[in-house]
Image (tube, rainbow, N blue to C red):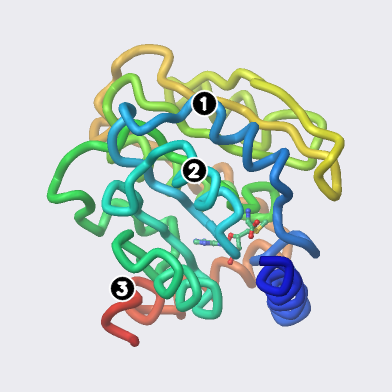
Amino acid sequence: MKQQCMAETFGFFQAWLKNPLRVAAIAPSDSALAALITSEISRDIGPVIELGPGTGAFTRALVARGVRQEDLALIEFGSEFAAALHFHYPRAHTVWMDAARLHTVELFDGRSAGAVVSGLPLLSMPPRKVIAILIGAFRKMEPDGAFYQFTYGPRCPVPHRLLDHLGLEAVRIGGTLANLPPAAVYRIRRTHAVPFDRVRFSSRQHVPSSKMAEARHAHYQSSGGRSFATWEKHA
Ligand SMILES: C[S@@+](CC[C@H](N)C(=O)[O-])C[C@H]1O[C@@H](n2cnc3c(N)ncnc32)[C@H](O)[C@@H]1O
């Protein structure tokens, strides 16, 4: 177990060296953060979607809370992580894709999820992508489903204005100093039952004009079908 943990930490660090913006942390999340972000989830909640599971620190905690592998969809953009997740959780639905395309995949035979747990680095993503991720996630959930997001920042990583526009609200459910760096977890829910397929958003006004955002957007556009295929198709 200790050896597996060291291998995971080393593999995570290597992935960060290769792609610091996508991985956005130098070490996997620790068990205190995993316990906090999964604290409101049990088997009874139904299917759970995990976005950006990385080495699977939150996945382990979800399984320990009784969530069946069959009720887990693991959406991961890093092929190195997706392969390992598929190996460790063979009955879960591991999908190697960009979480911004979540709306394009069918999960759990059409059943809605009870919760989404996200390890995604939302702060380093362009607003347009964050919007696509939130809309995709809330379309896949029951009306009272919750989106759990952690952050190293001092406030919710989704700006208030954006939450408002999408009819969402965020509540901080706790923080932990044990994680490196210290982190907090937010629960994001609908303020009222707006069907998400009716939400229209003019993303242009929110896309920052910095060179970095443009470069990220170009990379996103050019990734084509490669990013959207399931892991199984590429194994
Ligand atoms: C901060 S790390 C998560 C760490 C994870 N909790 C762990 O302990 O390993 C962010 C993860 O999100 C993944 N990721 C980043 N952008 C993504 C995207 N657009 N779609 C899916 N996964 C993404 C990264 O590959 C990485 O695994």
Please identify, in this view, whether the residue under mark 2 or under mark 3 is nearer the observer: 2
Q: Amino acid at mark 2?
A: Ala
Amino acid marked by disc 1: Ile
- Is 234 above or below relative to 231? below
Query: Which element is circle 2 on?
Result: helix
**Secondary structure found at label 1:** strand
Q: Is residue 81 left or right of residue 49?
A: right
Q: Which one is earlier in the sequence, the residue at label 1 or at label 3? A: 1
Disc 3 element: loop
Q: Give me the residue at 47% from left, 72% from top.
A: 82
Which x, y percent locates residue 1? 66, 66
Q: Residues within 10 Å of mark 2 (few under 14, many from 20)?
A: some
Q: Which residue is mark 1?
A: 188
Q: Which mark is residue 230?
A: 3
Asked if 80 appears above or below 52 in the picture, the reply is below
**Marks 2/3: CA distance?**
25 Å
Quadrant in which residue 106 is drawn: bottom left
Residue type at mark 3?
A: Thr
Q: Which residue is disc 2 drawn over?
A: 64
Q: Do labels 2 and 3 touch, CB within 8 Å?
A: no
